[in-house]
Image: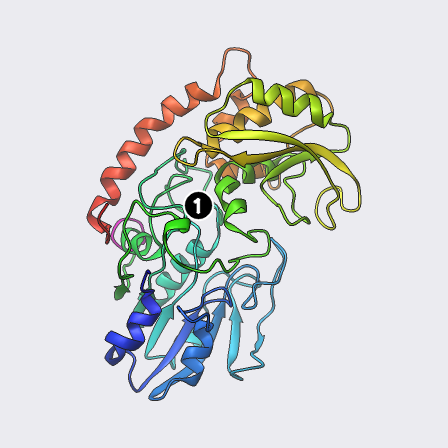
Amino acid sequence: MIALGVDRLFTEQFDLIRGKRVGLYTNWSAVNADLVPSYVLFAMANNVTLAALFGPEHGISGAASAGEKVSSQIDDYSRVPVYSLYGETNKPMAETLRDLDVMICDIQDVGVRFYTYVWTLSYIMDACAEQGVPLIVCDRPNPLGGQIVQGPGVRAGFESFVGRFDVPIRHGLTIGELARLLNAQYLAKPCDLTVIPCGGLRRSMTFPQMGLHWVAPSPALAGFANLEHYPGSCLIEGTTLSEGRGTGFAFQVLGAPFINAVVLADYLNVLGLPGVRFRPVTFRPCAGKYAGVDCAGVMAHVTNASAYHPIMTWLIVLREVMITYAGQVDWLPPHQARYHFDLLMGTDDVRRNLLNDDTTVRALMTEWAVEEAAFRAKRAPYLLYQE
């Protein structure tokens, strides 16, 4: 079984926090091997003072909806202030750090660039560097594993809170490894960073091999099956189609009221996309797009995880649906001149070319291969785990 960074902090490197006032960036999904939330561990610990909590998107409880602004509050259990980093600011205010001896990060990332927890961490790193507060990252596994790098990076002009720096959609890094990379390569001023690695973790492991309990890091990622598709199916967020938010199988489905589910599933299965089969479904979201309305579409089932390429798969599905239902499916309109789909992709090349007759998704992937190789080389000095 994997030894989590937070457990190793308490059992092997407690001197790093002994007698100190700590701030903790976390949410309730960050638990130790016994399923005790990390913030409870710090609140209960002897010779440590939990002075402040810092919460990401979805809040410290992990219950807020995607994109919902979260207010700061007092935590009911520990009675310490919880400073929201997904409300008025994404970066800790200087006054929230002044009385801290050390900042701790212990939060479960998912290994996908547009998941916002890592970008909140990057702003914490900025603030720690400015205020001279050391930062300890208690590492956790990347549930998607550490071998695969896929998708484009973030091109100039497409930086956002779903991609602050030039990182591929699937980066194959743990949050600790990514923090090491950001600190050395991207941040204007590096912070005093310590990463406590996991014990027993190998790059080849994905979640089913880790011997850990799945605790949803956010409401829509209720299980590992949701995450398997997320690097590709989250792109549907940038269209008028439903990606299944408001159901128990978000990111496993695509649908809309006007789709013929059986015909679409049959057609997609004829394409023979590797490692996946499609099943016709009808679902009724309780929130999000088409809330309360029956949507017909497809549900994807991974049949061979090593062959499945979620980004390629869902872009091909999206292309076929947008062509078949032209005039009924569209991109979400831009906000401040930027399309949400483009921010998720990190570029507008895909949106501008996806529906062209002379463009294929596999051709786009060939272009990304150069970026993927360059990122593999860039990340190499910051890796903590062997194959």
The spot of residue 371 in percent (x, y) is 32, 31
The spot of residue 257 in percent (x, y) is 77, 33
Q: Is residue 168 depicted above or below 196 in this figure? A: above
Q: Residue at x 38, y 39 (%)?
A: 168
Q: Which quarter of the image is occupied by the C terminus? A: top left
Badge 1 marks a residue whose secondary structure is loop
Question: What amino acid type should be assigned to the residue bearing mark 1?
Answer: Val
**Residue 358 on the magenta span:** no
- The total of numbered circles placed on residues is 1
Q: Main secondary structure of the magenta part?
A: helix
Q: Nearer the viewer, residue 353 or 200?
A: 200
Q: In this rendering, would 249 be left or right of 308?
A: right
Q: Which residue is mark 1?
A: 112
Q: Residue at x 37, y 28 (%)?
A: 368
The spot of residue 284 in percent (x, y) is 75, 43
Q: Residue at x 38, y 51 (%)?
A: 142
Q: Residue at x 49, y 15 (%)?
A: 359
Q: In this rendering, would 265 be left or right of 175?
A: right
Report which quarter residue 47 is drawn in. Answer: bottom left
**What's the magenta region?**
183-187
Q: Is residue 166 depicted above or below 84 in this figure? A: above
The spot of residue 347 in percent (x, y) is 46, 32
Q: Nearer the viewer, residue 199 or 219?
A: 199
